[in-house]
Image (tube, grey):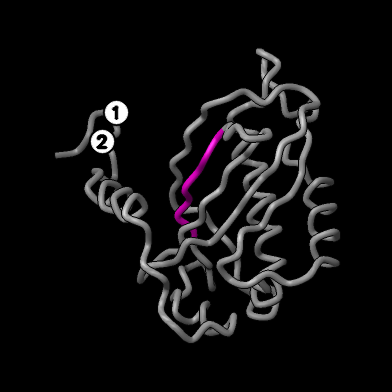
């Protein structure tokens, strides 16, 4: 089940905090709750992705995107993700969730997220995201302008550009029988 109460709490508490610059890192402290656990009593990989949602909502509030979304009637969408899972988060452990906007290309925004337990990075994600307008992707330049950013995106890090290129080479759509298309 989606953590709507956590989402409401995040949205309310983040609105009371100072604004962040567009490329600042947002950080928030969290705790692994019993409904976050899987059968091995560690945080479920699907729940990690859901908690990343909360981090992106929090970042959107703090950088002013949330107000733009509401004003324009726009929505948020995830168009791709790559996640590395490296260390367990178990019941009631505290961890930090960090989220930052890395930049954009002609179509998508790229966001980096990680969960940390002390000095240990437990998992790390790169997400391709978009802003929707009337069911279609809004032009990234329009979104950046609406947020008061007139300049270009900073250059995406090489590892992000490599992921983008690799994903563009991936066959789409996949074959229905599970094999890759030519």
Residue 46, image x, y percentages: 60, 32
Residue 154: say if magenta.
no
Looking at this rendering, what residue extends furthest in the left direction?
182
Q: Which residues are magenta?
A: 123-129
Q: On the rendered structure, is 61 left or right of 111?
A: right
Can you tell which mark lies on residue 94?
A: none
Residue 11, image x, y percentages: 79, 59
SS at mark 1 in the image = loop
Residue 118, image x, y percentages: 68, 34
Would you identify the image quadrant in which residue 179 lies? top left
Q: On the rendered structure, is 114 left or right of 126?
A: right
| Residue marked by disc 1 | 178
| Residue marked by disc 2 | 175
Magenta stretch: helix, strand or loop mostly: strand
Q: Nearer the viewer, residue 5 or 63?
A: 63
SS at mark 2 in the image = loop
Q: Name the residue located 22 percent from the left edge and 48 percent from the top edge.
A: 169
């Amino acid at each position: 089940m989606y953590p709507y109460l956590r989402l409401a709490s995040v949205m309310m508490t983040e609105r009371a905090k100072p604004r962040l610059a567009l490329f600042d890192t947002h950080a928030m402290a969290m705790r692994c709750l019993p409904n976050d656990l899987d059968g091995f009593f560690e945080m479920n990989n699907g729940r990690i992705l859901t908690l990343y949602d909360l981090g992106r909502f929090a970042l959107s509030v703090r950088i002013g995107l949330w107000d733009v979304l509401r004003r324009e009637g726009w929505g948020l969408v995830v168009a791709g993700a790559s996640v590395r899972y490296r260390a367990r988060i178990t019941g009631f452990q505290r961890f930090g969730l960090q989220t930052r906007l890395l930049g954009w290309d002609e179509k998508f925004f790229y966001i980096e997220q990680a969960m940390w337990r002390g000095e240990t990075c437990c998992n790390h994600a790169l997400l391709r995201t978009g802003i929707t307008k009337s069911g279609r992707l809004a032009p990234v330049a329009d979104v950046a302008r609406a947020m008061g950013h007139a300049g270009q995106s900073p250059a995406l890090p090489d590892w992000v550009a490599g992921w983008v290129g690799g994903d563009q080479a991936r066959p789409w759509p996949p074959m229905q029988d599970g094999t890759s298309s030519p």
